[in-house]
Image (cartoon, rainbow, N blue to C red):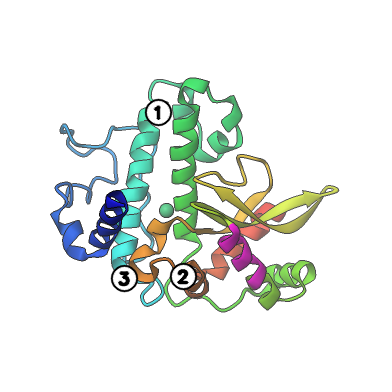
Amino acid sequence: MHELNRRHWLRVAAVSAGAWAMTPWLGQVEGQAGKGTEKGKDQPAAGPFTLPRLPYAYDALVPHIDARTMEIHHSRHHQAYVTNLNTAVAGTPLANQSIEQICRTIDQVPERIRTAVRNNGGGHYNHTFFWEVMAPNAGGQPAGALLEAINNIFTDFVTFKNRFKEAALGRFGSGWAWLVVARAEGRPTLRITHTPNQDNPLMDNSGVPILGIDVWEHAYYLQYQNRRGDYVDAWFNTVNWRAVSDKFMAARG
Ligand code: MN3
């Protein structure tokens, strides 16, 4: 029971800004995204993979996603996946492959590094994707061929949203919910899926993702605590349907 109390306290402490400010490594992260920074002991390992620049400001998705969450999520969580991926692939042929290629052939990665590559390579692919499908002043609904496909397959947009939310809520623990372009008898179709941890639909060949939501607690805990459903509802207001449409058109072929 003491352990429970302690864990509760840690969780409460973690959501206060003061606790973050006290962490000794705060401030070492920013500016380290690219290669070629001066190499010190605590610098991330140089490697083929780099943290992409967020295409909008950390506070650009307020009030749907708070700035502190975005900053920690991008500059620490995503950076850590990149750093650990670079460490895992160092000196291997994987260092010359794209992150998509690595995800698609994850079962062929040498066993010695497979778990590290799966978790951190998935983390890098998934978060890069995640930043792309969100934007400020976004939300609403898609148009054109994507809306037509959604209406065809899910009846209408509201039904699609409900089913996507169900997938996001149905993912027990940490993971992702996805909308993917899959093939049924050779023809493109849309499917909703979810994956555990940092897995993604490229890894199990279930389709090409065109929309995805991170449902790890680190994606929403500061603002929404345990209320994942509220986070999903709010997150729909950040969806960059233009970017999703582009991914749809590319994946549909
Ligand atoms: Mn995340």
The part of the chain drawn in magenta is 162-170
Place of residue 89 in the rendered image (x, y in percent of width and height, measured from the top left)? 42, 27
| Mark toward the start of the polypeptide (2 vs 3) | 3
Amino acid identity at mark 2: Tyr
Badge 2 vs badge 3, beta-carbon distance below 8 Å: no
Residue 51 is left or right of residue 229, and the answer is left
How far apart are the alpha carbons under marks 2 and 1? 33 Å
Residue at left offset 46%, top offset 25%: 113
- Seen at 54% across and 25% down, the residue is 109
Residue type (three-letter) at the residue carrying disc 3 = Asp
Q: Check contact, mark 1 vs mark 3: CB within 8 A.
A: no
The local secondary structure at tag 1 comes to helix
Residue 165 belongs to the span the image colors magenta: yes
> x, y percentage for residue 58?
31, 65
Which badge, 2 or 1, comes first in the chain's sequence? 1
Q: Do the residues bearing badges 2 and 1 touch, measured as CB atoms within 8 Å?
A: no
